[in-house]
Image: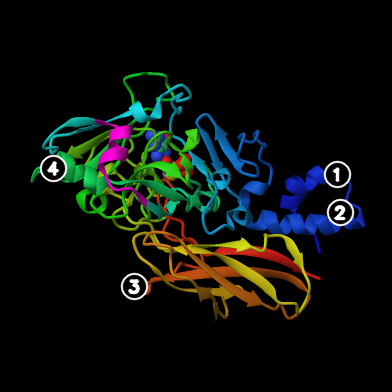
Amino acid sequence: MVLSERVVSGRGAAHGVYSRRSMLRGSLATVSAALCPLAAGQPVLPAIPGKPGLKVLSERPINAETPAHLLDDPVTPAERMFVRNNGIPPDTRDIDPLNWTLELAGEACARPMQLTLGELKDRFEHVTLALQIECGGNGRSEFHPPARGNQWTTGAVACPRFTGVRLKDVLEYCGTTDAAVYVAYEAADTHLSGDPTKQPISRGVPMHKALEAETLIAWAMNGEPLPPLHGYPLRLVAGGWPGSVSGKWLKRILVRDRVHDGPKMGGQSYRVPCDPVAPGATVPDEAMCIIESMPVKSLITHPRSGSRQERAKPIAVRGHAWAGDLGVASVFTSIDFGATWQPADLNEPANRLAWQQWSTNIAIPTLGYYEIWARAVDENGRSQPLVLPGWNPRGYLNNACHRIALAVA
Ligand SMILES: Nc1nc2c(c(=O)[nH]1)N[C@H]1C(S)=C(S)[C@@H](COP(=O)(O)O)O[C@H]1N2
Ligand SMILES: [Mo]
């Protein structure tokens, strides 16, 4: 196998001399590098303590994604949950969590009030749900022309189990007026500039999403208090929508009489062209629409891309599939670049808005280089595209099929 220029100048070059054996390794690196645009020539940033194996994409603010093979668990452990910060997390080391106050306010809030986390826990029914969160920019690294921002490959998605109260119950308690249109969050993290009057992010959802039974104000993840990086002591979780609506370090909930206009709601943030545009187009802000439910997508979490397999021996292949507010109807795999597809077994979700597990056995007929592709179809019959979906200025919503590479020996 000839080493491509990319590997010689990128990841393969780090191996130094190419003995016959390292040539083979080099070929495997090619396999992974070909599928993972970030593998080549990028500086390696130090790991986040408590997040072994996550790839740090930026340090200030801290952002890190999870390689697909580390997302194998049906319920994502905290150590394997991606981190997406727009600002500087608050220092919550010395707070008394039960006295953390949540303020309810906004033009359409009937009875503005403050509730402590202790009061939230006492007054409302506790709910535990597995909820899938994916960053709107997950997959951004594949767009051309490239989009600015964190170059997420496939790893800005997770599905932990959150415990909290329903946002709906709290909104009913404080009351909303007929003018209510949107529910937004404000949080305790600070702006990168250090300017205390600026918020890094304040986003929201329309009333119908806020009032869904699965939209939570959560204090626990996988049975433990929320980890500091994931919003301790309190966060919103609105599964199936861009992760940016799931506000961490939650301080304030605003019931708005208009579409929320906080930082990163307007302009080009978390928005895509209302009508499709040609790659590289400049799109005026007025022609951009807010992203709501995320599109159907899937991940192959086993085997690991780049692994060696034996010919004709069945390979257990598995992963997850999700479809925003919708359920996933079917998942297919292909070992011939999408020429033919085989249906996989697909489980029901643990609850609405949890990702679904799929699995299949694949026997590879001959020696050589193979890719496994996975493709999910949502309950409305909409499939993941095989190649990149519509280009957009900020590189959101890439739900192209996930591909992994195998060397069959
Ligand atoms: N307060 C606050 N909440 C936030 C963010 C943030 O920067 N500040 N980032 C959002 C974005 S863009 C995403 S994708 C998710 C990521 O959640 P995680 O870091 O717990 O994985 O949190 C959201 N909530
Ligand atoms: Mo995000």
**What residue lies at 79% left-to-right and 43% top-to-bottom?**
14
Q: Pointer 1 and pointer 3: residues touching (CB < 8 Å)? A: no
Of the residues under marks 1 and 2, which one precedes in the sequence?
1
Residue 266 appears in view: no
Q: Earlier in the sequence, mark 1 or mark 4?
A: 1
Front of the two marks 3 and 4: 4
Residue type pointed to by label 2: Ser
**Label 1–label 2 contact, CB within 8 A:** yes
Mark 2 = which residue? 22
Say which residue label 3 marks. Answer: 380
Residue found 75% across the figure and 79% down from its top: 312
Residue tagged by mark 1?
16
Left or right: residue 59 compared with residue 185: right
Question: Alpha-carbon neighbours of circle 1 within 10 Å: few (<14), some, or many (≥20)?
Answer: few
The span from disc 1 to disc 3 (Cα, nearest Å) is: 51 Å
Q: Residue at x 53, y 76 (%)?
A: 345
Residue 116 colored in magenta in the image: yes
Query: Which circle's residue, 1 or 3, is located before the other in the chain?
Result: 1
**Residue 176, label in figure:** 4
Q: Amino acid at mark 1?
A: Gly
SS at circle 4? loop
